[in-house]
Amino acid sequence: MNTTRKTGALVLAAGKGTRMKSSKPKVLHTLLGEPMLWYVHRALEVLSLSSITTVIGHGADQVRRAFAELTDDAFVLQTEQRGTGHALQEAWPALKKQQLDAVLVANGDTPLVPAARLRQLVEESEARNADIAFLTISLDKPGAYGRVIRDENGFAKAIVEAKDFHPEDHGGEVHEINAGIYWLNMERVAPLLGQLNNNNASGEFYITDLVALGVQQGLTVLAVDGGTDPGLLGVNSPAELVRSEELLRAQIVDGLLDSGVLVHNPAAAFIGPKAEIEPGCELFGPLEIYGKSRISGETCVQSHCRIDSSVIGAGSIIKAFTHLENAQVDASCQVGPYTRLRPSAHVCDGAKVGNFVEMKKSTLGKGSKASHLTYLGDAQVGKDVNIGAGTITCNYDGKNKYTTVIGDESFIGSNTSLVAPVEIGAKALVGAGSVITHNVSENSLGITRAKQKELPRRK
């Protein structure tokens, strides 16, 4: 977006969100695995503004940790949460330091805010040389939202908070509401900040009062019509969050279908906004795919799977009831059903991980198989290895983790315990039921098995 002014963004994210009935900061409540504030930042980033500053307050340290990639000067601390107007006052010195001409103010609890609407506000504000501008939305039931009051010529006159709105004083019911997104000329608005007061039902300082103050001072105040776009609505309760999440979920799934991804039972497919799924993939709901997951073409993911920040290569099959977390599956692999791949698990090309197998910080080499009932922790398994049922790598001694190395083309018999640190050489055979505590050489048989005894059965 090309702007004629140096414009920055200010995100208001300090509130507790009492109606969420949670101790967690409101803006950290998630939709499809990502916090509300992340969505607002992403929409603003599309506009290529000079800067994005976020006002934090309740749970400020939690918000900083959730956005650890941001520098300290990207945040402004509002120690006391005394309303949106007070948040703007607290942030003003930081905005002035950035030498901005204008600031776009948005709320951190509007996760579905469309970048196109933000762009509309900025462009109309600049085109009409506004001093103050804000987006509006029309609702059949405006509820607890601030009402937009216009004069007889249709220009914005004031925004009246719902608690202070009385139809008899404002010519009847008003369905146009304030979307809580503003464009402010820094130079013109600065003198108005000190005139904000908290003489209202909530005892807070409202940024909305800038509209009436601007009108009184003869400034150019615009109310930019955002139509009925539901993305402009904020999230104030668990019910509203779930409704917004469902809107977003449907948008993402529809986009995948349009791109050539086949999604069966689409109403039960929950796919996060960071996930990349190539055309030609086939997904079966119910399933969940979150984080920076990447799924290559011709891959099939069956139902009841959860995939989080994992990579899956082309032509692989992820069978039902499989969980992947920060894992990598290469091309033409078969994983599941009932497999769990934990962080740093790597299944190489053509390998197979079957039912009730768990991998953690381990690599299963090309063409290798761990078909069932196995735990591979801190293990490096070569190519074309067969891991028998019931095999476990005993990687933890109560204090430290140790590595198990299994060479190419070796065969590990069923019900084997490999006590790390231990190395099994290439083409070695480990007899079923063994507890291996020492290295096994290449082309050797390793076996630990007590002599079988047969005693008379007592009656």
Image: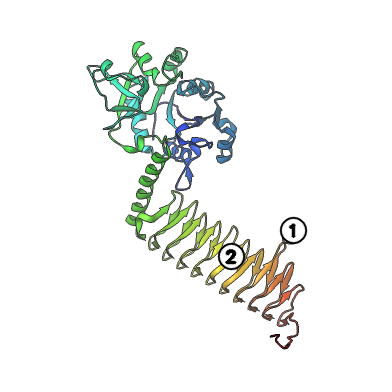
Residue drawn at (39%, 59%), measured in percent from left and top? 285
Q: How is the image coloured?
A: rainbow
Number of disc labels: 2
Q: Is residue 11 above or below residue 268?
A: above
Residue drawn at (44%, 50%), measured in percent from left and top? 272
User: Farthest residue in the right direction?
Assistant: 438
User: Farthest residue in the front direction?
Assistant: 459
Residue drawn at (52%, 72%), measured in percent from left and top? 350
Label 2 crowd bin: few (<14), some (14–19), many (20+), radius 10 Å = many
The residue that mark 2 highlights is 358
Q: Residue 240 versus residue 136: which sits nearer the camera? A: 240
Question: If you read the primary sequence from the N terminus, does the residue marked by circle 2 or circle 1 appear first?
Answer: 2
Decide if residue 447 is on the left or right side of residue 59.
right
Q: Is residue 348 visible?
A: no
Question: In which quadrant of the rendered view does residue 298 lie?
Answer: bottom left
Q: Is residue 83 visible?
A: yes
The residue that mark 1 highlights is 400
**Residue 121 locus on image (x, y percent):** 35, 30
Q: Residue 188 versus residue 164: which sits nearer the camera? A: 164
State the separation of the CA atoms marked 2 and 1: 20 Å
**Residue 421 locus on image (x, y percent):** 74, 67
Question: In which quadrant of the rendered view does residue 410 lie?
Answer: bottom right
Label 1 crowd bin: few (<14), some (14–19), many (20+), radius 10 Å = few
Q: Amino acid at mark 2?
A: Glu
**Residue 90 locus on image (x, y percent):** 52, 21
Residue drawn at (38%, 14%), measured in percent from left and top? 213
- Find numbered disc 2 in the image and state the secondary structure of the residue it sits on: strand
Q: Residue 48 versus residue 295: which sits nearer the camera? A: 295
User: Which corner quadrant holds the N terminus?
Assistant: top left
Q: Amino acid at mark 1?
A: Asn
User: Which corner quadrant holds the C terminus?
Assistant: bottom right
